[in-house]
Image (tube, rainbow, N blue to C red):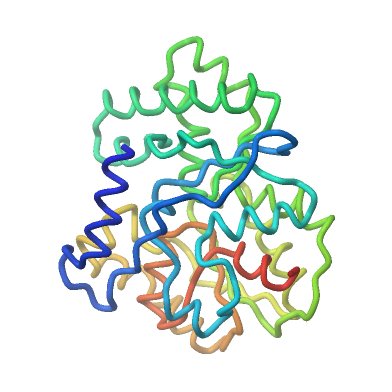
Amino acid sequence: MAGITAAARAAIGAELVPEWEPPMPPPAKAGMPPTVQPGAAAVYLPACVNRIFGRDTEGLAAGDPLAPGSLPEALVAVSLRAGKPVWIPTDVAGSCCGTPWVSKGYRDGAAWMVNSTVEDLWRWSDGGRLPVVIDASSCTHGLLEAAERLNAPNAERLAAMTILDSVAWAADHLLPDLEVGERIGSAVIHPTCSGTHLGLNGELERLAAALADEVVVPDEATCCGFAGDRGFLHPELSASATAGEASQVAAANGDAHICANRTCEIGLTRATGESYESFVYLLERLTR
């Protein structure tokens, strides 16, 4: 998996992928921000999708040129600011929640991958002593739903660990210890399918309410239709799924457009012309 993510970054950076309209997002940075294990409040597992796709250049330039350029950098920075430093293990590159295999029907590959990842998480978390934070809701959901693909020891390990999506980590563990500076006027939210399954939409709205005077959740903000890689291979699916939401987003005229899953953000950016990105960037910027 480490080789796959590295190859995907290289292909995107070298523009060896087909032409997309709008263009493919830029590749993520190859390395992770420096963190240390001693004193860490949580283990941070950056999702593979966030190790492949970086932050949109347009969003960075228009929104906040001083912000960290990657999602891991932003989450590390804001966690440290709240007094809850996170640790990214040095051997994190080959880990994955198994969802890409599950979505393709590769049962054996999914079982092997998730068992390997749970064993790593058990080791990294010191036998479940530290919580594990994941920065993509679909990956958090995929890992928490993986019990049936685990062997008996790993099923017990997963049940004994605390797995937190970045939305829950930020809302419940970071926000109480952060001071919000100047608020923005309005934030438009796209609640993801995985966030709905995890019951995190209320927490995402609570985070947005701490950062913006007005929080907008379009009535037609349902599934974006991107579904992993389907939005790349069949963009018409995502375009159809987001048509109603796109018109409501245009009417809202928000100052920020936030989400918690990278591929959903890609789909919504394409559909609306607005720069959708993780709420973590806005949280980091307004509490800096």
In the image, 233: left or right of 265?
Answer: left
Residue name at image x 65 percent, y 31 percent: 162
Residue name at image x 65 percent, y 23 percent: 128
Name of the residue lying farthest toward the top: 152
Among the 4 quarters of the image, the one containing residue 102 = top left
**Residue 220 or residue 171, whichever sits in front:** 171
Among the 4 quarters of the image, the one containing residue 36 = top right
Instruction: In the rendered view, tell whether residue 185 sits above or below residue 141.
Output: below
In the image, 122: left or right of 193?
Answer: right
Instruction: In the rendered view, tell whether residue 111 sits above or below residue 260.
Output: above
Instruction: In the rendered view, tell whether residue 229 sits above or below residue 245.
Output: above
**Residue 113 or residue 248, whichever sits in front:** 113
**Residue 108 or residue 14, whichever sits in front:** 14
In percent of width and height, residue 44 lies at 58, 42
In percent of width and height, residue 96 lies at 40, 37
Image quadrant for the N terminus? top left
Residue name at image x 50 percent, y 16 percent: 154
In percent of width and height, residue 279 lies at 60, 65
Instruction: In the rendered view, tell whether residue 160 sits above or below residue 2.
Output: above
Image quadrant for the C terminus? bottom right
Among the 4 quarters of the image, the one containing residue 74 = bottom right
In the image, 220: left or right of 282?
Answer: left
In percent of width and height, residue 111 lies at 34, 23
Residue name at image x 17 percent, y 72 percent: 19
